[in-house]
């Protein structure tokens, strides 16, 4: 079976940087406990490997406050400002692996909210990156992830707004929601904070999906950017499959299948992509 694998598939810069930070800390820890605030990335295989090496995941402020010693690694999605404050107050060692593109958004919303602007984040409600961004604002903040959210958003039209985006949001959807907000009459400046790697990955995945008979999208089930890749590919190729690992791959291919496309989210290790690619080539 002939395959096309996206060149952009797999770890992005921010994810690789975060994972490298954890493994570097493991090598240097000399037995000191290591924690990540939330899973370092949205990939169960990577998180399990780190757990096997003694890295613990803490998921809330109470667990953080209970720590007495050790290193806390801030995951690539970033965290709210108060988490950094608590780590400092507890005098814990902090390794900040926040993606620089996410950190840029923190700086933008902190500055703009201090200047009196309302903040509108276009992104997924409840996503850790969005929650972290929200935690750097100092005034009214709103989140919109759908057309319905944008239509019912009720920010004060007499106060200027700053609109930013989750780094992994669908670019076309971002533009659509911004247009809705503009038509509602908000006085706003728009900062497109979708990272270039995300946009390039989405464009490439969509292009490949138009050329193939079957599309495979690999990534963690909780990965926002992988879910968006799946949605983009599904629009172009009806036979699109979302899997986490090779074990999930159960293809019932039409006899006319000649070409399979493969892409993967930003938290998918290279070895998993290669396993899927090799399996498809050998078995179909």
Image: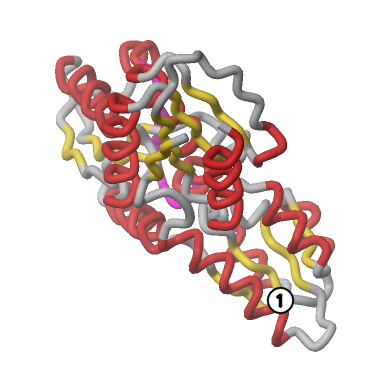
Q: Which residues are magenta?
A: 135-146
Q: Main secondary structure of the magenta part?
A: loop
Image check: 129 left or right of 83?
A: left
- Quarter occupied by residue 85: bottom right
The answer to whether one can see residue 131 in this image is yes
Q: Residue, x 36% and y 57% (percent of image)? A: 101
Disc count in the image? Answer: 1
Image check: 55 left or right of 149?
A: right
Question: Helix, strand or loop at disc 1?
Answer: loop
Q: Residue, x 69% and y 62% (percent of image)? A: 36
- Quarter occupied by residue 166: top left
Q: Between 81 and 21, which is closer to the camera in this rendering?
A: 21
Circle 1 packing at 10 Å, graded few (<14), some (14-19), many (20+), is some
278 part of magenta stretch? no
Percent position (x, y) of residue 88? 63, 73
In the displayed structure, 261 sits above or below 145; it is below
Q: Residue, x 78% and y 66% (percent of image)? A: 55
Image check: 101 left or right of 24?
A: left
Q: Between 230 and 59, which is closer to the camera in this rendering?
A: 230
138 part of magenta stretch? yes
Percent position (x, y) of residue 84? 58, 65
Q: Which residue is mark 1?
A: 92
Percent position (x, y) of residue 47? 71, 55
Q: Between 172 and 146, which is closer to the camera in this rendering?
A: 172
- Quarter occupied by residue 219: top right
Render colour scheme: secondary structure
Percent position (x, y) of residue 235? 35, 17
């Amino acid at each position: 079976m002939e395959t096309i694998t996206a060149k952009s598939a797999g770890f992005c810069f921010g994810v690789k940087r975060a994972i490298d930070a954890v493994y570097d800390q493991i090598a240097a820890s000399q037995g000191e406990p290591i924690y990540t605030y939330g899973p370092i990335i949205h990939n169960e295989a990577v998180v399990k490997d780190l757990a096997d090496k003694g890295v613990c995941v803490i998921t809330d402020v109470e667990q953080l406050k209970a720590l007495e010693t050790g290193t806390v690694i801030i995951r690539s999605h970033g965290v709210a400002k108060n988490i950094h404050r608590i780590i400092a107050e507890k005098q814990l060692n902090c390794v900040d692996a926040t993606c620089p593109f996410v950190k840029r958004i923190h700086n933008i919303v902190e500055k703009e909210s201090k200047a009196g602007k309302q903040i509108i984040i276009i992104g997924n409600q409840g996503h850790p990156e969005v929650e972290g961004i929200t935690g750097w604002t100092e005034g009214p903040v709103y989140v919109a992830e759908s057309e319905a959210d944008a239509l019912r958003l009720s920010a004060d039209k007499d106060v200027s707004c700053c609109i930013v985006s989750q780094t992994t949001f669908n670019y076309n959807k971002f533009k659509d929601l911004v247009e809705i907000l503009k038509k509602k009459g908000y006085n706003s400046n728009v900062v497109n904070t979708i990272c270039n790697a995300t946009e390039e990955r989405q464009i490439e995945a969509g292009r490949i999906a138009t050329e193939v008979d079957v599309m495979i999208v690999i990534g963690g089930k909780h990965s926002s950017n992988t879910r968006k890749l799946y949605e983009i590919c599904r629009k172009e190729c009806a036979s699109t499959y979302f899997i986490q690992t090779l074990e999930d791959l159960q293809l019932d291919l039409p006899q006319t299948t000649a070409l399979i496309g493969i892409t993967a989210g930003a938290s998918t290790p290279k070895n998993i992509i290669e396993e899927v690619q090799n399996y498809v080539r050998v078995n179909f």
